[in-house]
Every structure is written in C-alpha cells, then in structure tokens.
Image: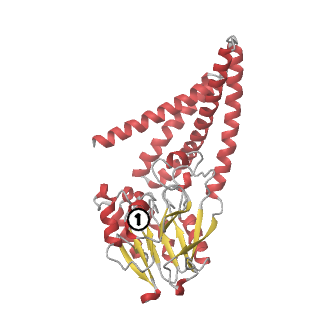
Amino acid sequence: MTRVLVFIAVVLAIAVGVHYYLWARLVRDPHLPAPWRGLASIALVLLAVGMPLAMIVGRKHAAAGRVLAWPAFIWMGLMFLLSTTLAATDLLRLVAALVGRAGGLPSNPERRTAIARLVASAVTALSGGLAIAAFRSARGPIAVHRVTVELARLPAAHDGFRLVQLTDIHVGSTIGRAFVEDIVRRANGLEPDLIALTGDLVDGSVADLRDAVAPLGALRARHGVFFVSGNHEYFSGADPWFEELTRLGIRVLRNERVAIGDGDDGFDLAGVDDHSAERFGGVAPAVALERALGGRDARREVVLLAHQPRSFLDAEPFAVGLQLSGHTHGGQMWPFGVFVRMSQPFVAGLHRRRDAQIYVSRGTGYWGPPMRLGAPAEITELVLRRAPPST
C-alpha cells in the first residue's frame, strides 16, 4: 500500500509541475491580457484535474469513463508535445542569454516579454499541428509492415511461412470493437499460416471489454492463433483474460511450447508470460524461459513469443532463432523513444545478436494519448525463409 501511495504522490507531483510549467511559459511570461489570462489559467486547472478524474470515474462507470477519456488523453498527448517543445526552446533561450550576458547585452524587460509571446505562439501552433498529425496517424488506417526473416534451422517445408503479429492493441477507453473488427478483417485478409498476439491486448476487465474483444474470435490462420501476456494484462486481471481468450479459440501460451507442422518438417513455437509476471504471483523470467525452452531438441528451429524485448538477452542460452516482441510502441511519440531505450535493449524493427534475431513491433494500437508521432502503428507480416547454407 505504501508503494502505491508513493507512486500516486510522484505522479501527481509530476502532473502539477508540468502544468505549472505550461502556465508559466504560456500564460505568465507572455503577460496575457485580461480576460485571457484568467481563462487560460482556469482551463489548465480543469485539464489537469480531467486526467485523474477520467481514470477514477472509469473504474466505477466504464461508459462515463470512456466519454471523459477522450479529452483527457488528447490533452495528455498535447501536454507532452507542448512541454517538450517548450523545454527545447528554453534551452535555446538559455544559450542565447548566456551569449548575450558574455557580450554585455543589457537586460530589456520589453524584449523578454515580446520573445515570450513569440515563443508561446509558435510553440502552441507547432504542438497543435503535431498533435493533429499524431492523432491521424494513430486513428487512421494501419499499415501492413512486411518483413522477411531468414532462419538457419527452418525446415524446407516451411520456407515462405507467413506469420502475422498483432501486439499492443490496448483495447480500452478509446479503442473499441470497431477498431478490433478492422484489425481482424485485415489480418485475415493476409491469409497467414499463424497469428501471434504478443501482449498488452487490453486495458480493463473482462466484464467491461468482453464485447470489444469478441471479434478476435474470428481470427483465422492455418496453424492457429496464439497469445502471450503483456504487463497490461496483469494490471487488468490476467487469469480472467486467459480464460476469455481461450473461450474465443485463441491458444494462450504460458511458459510452454508447441510444435508447428509435423515431425522433422516442423518447428517449435514457444511463449512466455510477461517479464513482470513474478510481481503478480507468476514465475520469475528465468523460470519461464526454462519451462518454455528447456530440454528441447536444439536441431529444431524455435520462434519465441515474449512481450518485452528484454527477454531476448535472457533467452540467449536457449538458441532461439527468432523472438517476436512488442511493448515499446516504437516510442509512440517522438522523442519518447529516447526514454524507452533506457529500459529496453531494442525499440523497433529487426535486430540480430549472434545467431539469434528479434523483431520488435511498434504495436497495432496505442496507449494513453490517441496519438503516434514518428512511430506509426503496424500489422506485421513476417515471412520466414530458410537461410541458405553458410559457406
């Protein structure tokens, strides 16, 4: 309980600090005239209150929470753009001030006010334009991203095997049934051999989101549809979701593997619970990997489904040919990817480490703000090819 209270206190302190910073740079420093100064101040207070209010109301009344979530999350994205853009201009202004002081340039209050007004206007216009572009990227048609992966141990019988990866859909307050139906239609249209859902499917309980997620039951692939958990499943009640997805005909892989294809002409598909599962009563990441990959025939190719890219480094002793992950959203909104790199070894795309490869999807949905900037969503079609013999 203490950790939760500390977390809430830190989040609130950050929110208050960011809103004060926005007020100082966009309202106070430009010396907005009345009544705009008062109206802008009130608006910032209401927007600051709106985000926690939407989350609190959403826990008790899902429908009302969805209504409040749209303005709250759109403001969250715009707030991020405003604050990062202002921070960049503040750095430039600091450099200019230091240069001016070194050159003996006298202080001029009128000039400072004029610059503050110019900066506030430019930042507001730029951030607003970026927010619109980011919204259209997140809510517009999702591109199919095709990737070819060569695997040394892939049987000739599966050369050209087509695997569709869907990840980080985050069905919840701003992503509903229509969004899921469109994803299902497009995934099925690719006629894949296998579909992999690599976590963070939902942000909410089965009771609230059962209808929105139901279209996933229509996913079709020759070798089946598989799911592994992400950290958000544990925030939302993992066990009920495992049961619900199983009811929909989706195979939930929990620290286990299955054979794809027949005998020597097949390969292994393994899946592990999210890296954070231990905090919610699950097993440690090392134990999960051992259960899923330990004791297998090392001559067979194996594709590992693991929500977080960090599992890739832990899986190195098990000779995994390919790992499919999500979690990072590719950063979702530039420049947030810089911070993602501090906690994850890979952010997006195909990477190789010795004989193993990992593909990290940017995600099919989004979390929080319905915005994506510099990291478009994707439905990933991976074509597995048999690597030519090394010379």
Front residue of 96 and 8: 96
Quarter that holds the C terminus: bottom right
Q: Nearer the viewer, residue 256 or 156?
A: 156
Amino acid bearing label 1: Glu
Q: Residue at x 51, y 45 (%)?
A: 339
Quarter-wise, where is residue 375 in the image? bottom right
Residue 208 in view in this figure: no
198 sits to left or right of 254: right
Asked which secondary structure carries label 1, the reply is: helix
Task: Tell me the residue at 65%/63% (across/down).
Answer: 141
Location of mark 1 (residue)? 316
Circle 1 crowding by C-alpha within 10 Å: few under 14, some 14–19, many from 20: some
Left or right for 113, reference 215? right
Image spot of residue 333 (x, y percent): 58, 48
Q: Residue at x 68, y 11 (%)?
A: 104
Above-or-below relation of 249 to 378 = below
Q: Position of residue 270 (x, y in %)?
A: 40, 73
Q: Quadrant of residue 34?
A: top right
Asked whether residue 142 is in view, the answer is yes
Task: Please tell me in which quadrant of the rendered image residue 33 appears.
Answer: top right
* Image position, residue 76 (x, y; %): 54, 43
Q: Is residue 267 left or right of residue 94?
A: left
Q: Residue 311 appears at what percent x and percent y?
A: 41, 61
**What color scheme is it?**
secondary structure
Name the residue: 67% across, 48% down.
Answer: 132
